Amino acid sequence: MKAPQFAYVRAASLAEVFSVWAAAGPEAKLLAGGQTLLATLAFRLSDPGTLVDISRVPELKGIAQVGDAVRVGALTTHAELGAHELIRRHVPLLAQAVPLIAHPAIRNRGTIGGSLAYADPAAELPACCVALEASIMARTAAGERRIPAAQFFTGLYTTALAPNELIAAIEFPLAKAGERSVVLELARRSGDYAMAGVVAKAKLAGSTLVDPSVVFFGVGDRPVSAERATAAVAGKIATPETIAAAQAALDADLDPPADLHGSPQMKRHLARVLLARALRRIAGTEEARAA
Amino acid sequence: MSSDVDISLTVNGERVARRVEARRHLIDFLRLDLGLMGSHTGCEHGVCGACTVRVDGRIVRGCLVLAASLDGGTVETIEGVSDSGEIRDLQEAFVARNACQCGYCTPAMLLTAADLLSSNPQPTRAEIREHLSGNYCRCTGYHAIVDAVETVAKQRGGRAGS
């Protein structure tokens, strides 16, 4: 279907974004990469009245190291993210996640800020941000504030952003020495949204998992931290018994809704399978096996 | 604020200036405003890949790009890369392998295959399938398409090595 009529304004600066956006009323939407927004417009799920094109706003671009973090501009495309030297060196989980996001033609245009603002519960980057303890740098005309990723996703397609507040950048802590991370997902076809996915990281001290973190996607209304499963492996060696205990604990961490892909029982099963694979991958006992 | 937007851009090497509706996506712009019918409209919501074209040198979903956002940009379509001869070997291999089938997905398949070979000149069959996975063929003749892309990779590799 064709999109509804709307007015279009291309903003050249952040100041212009905020002035145009405020004047355009509460229905107006920001256009970044458009890879989700234009599809929702084609379905007429959205009738924004005005689109404010922010894709050329220089303040929202670029990747740079800032102290002990890498700051990623909201307009960074998935393709740019996956290829960037600072990301590959200091936040390698993101480079792992990028090939799982949609397809090359979409990764060339879709942006990290757009993905986080849309907050699809089956998307990879929101879960990565939670697992990596990233900060969402949110901006209004009045200034910037820092929102921990764990508090940013508040429900289905819902975030902590206030009206007329946008994502300016995301700050990722630099990976620590000895830290290992993995992102795995199960999808019916390559590039589809995941039926279930997991992001896991831990430091490996010898064979012991230290400071583990396990976050699932596609099994709830937002990224889901698996607190009990994480506790079951913290300070342990990833033996088959430890993994089985984590899988058992996982049941209480998740409350997956049924969706097009299957029942809650199926999602629980997929999550258990992914958890075991992720823990083995981090522990180095399943190096080469494809997810 | 207006729902009509003036744009000036380069399409297949030619400068074009038009006034477009803000909601006009790139494929309707190419087909209906410029008469370039090689780019195909499929699902119109970013799933099927039939509308793949190049914007500023990179493949994109034409249905997920507003023409209005491309002022100053560069667009290349199947017509452009056919005329330049850039993908002649891919086109010949698609014919030789009967990879065109009904032809609807073909222009996008060719541009996506060219994109793969430019960044990964010697892909495995699995890598070819992965890169083409966002382009649907409803004849479901993927095998012949993968064969054609693999053939060209080998041909080009042979030439580079000789």
Image (cartoon, coloured by chain):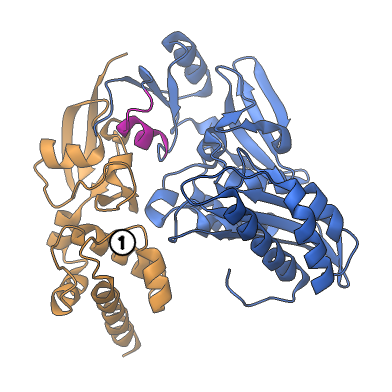
Location of residue A194 in the rendering, given as x and y in whole percent from the top left corner? 52, 53
Q: Please state if B30 lies on the left or on the right of B159 as rendered.
A: left
Colour displayed for chain B in the image of the structure: orange
Which of the pair A172/A207 is nearer the observer? Answer: A207
Location of residue A261 in the rendering, given as x and y in whole percent from the top left corner? 48, 51
Q: Please state if B109 lies on the left or on the right of A27 as rendered.
A: left
Which of the chains is blue?
A
Residue at the spot of label 1: B112
Q: Which quadrant of the figure contains the N terminus of chain A?
A: top left
Identify the residue at horizontal 21%, vertical 66% (top origin): B86
Residue range of the region highlighted in magenta in the rendering: A36-46
Would you say residue A100 is visible in this rendering?
Answer: yes
Which of the pair A255/B153 is nearer the observer? Answer: A255
Report the number of discs. 1
Asked whether residue A40 is drawn in magenta, I would say: yes
Amino acid type, mark 1: Thr
Would you say residue A174 is visible in this rendering?
Answer: no
Q: Is B140 above or below relative to A82?
A: below
Q: Please state if B17 lies on the left or on the right of A18 as rendered.
A: left
Identify the residue at horizontal 71%, vertical 66% (top origin): A276
Location of residue B100 in the rendering, given as x and y in whole percent from the top left corner? 16, 68
Q: Which quadrant of the figure contains the C terminus of chain A?
A: bottom right
The residue lying furthest to the left in this view is B35
Which of the pair A256/B46 is nearer the observer? Answer: A256
Asked whether residue A259 is drawn in magenta, I would say: no
The residue lying furthest to the right in this view is A235
User: Label 1: few (<14), some or many (≥20) within 10 Å?
Assistant: many
Q: Quadrant of residue B83?
A: bottom left
Q: Quadrant of residue A280?
A: bottom right
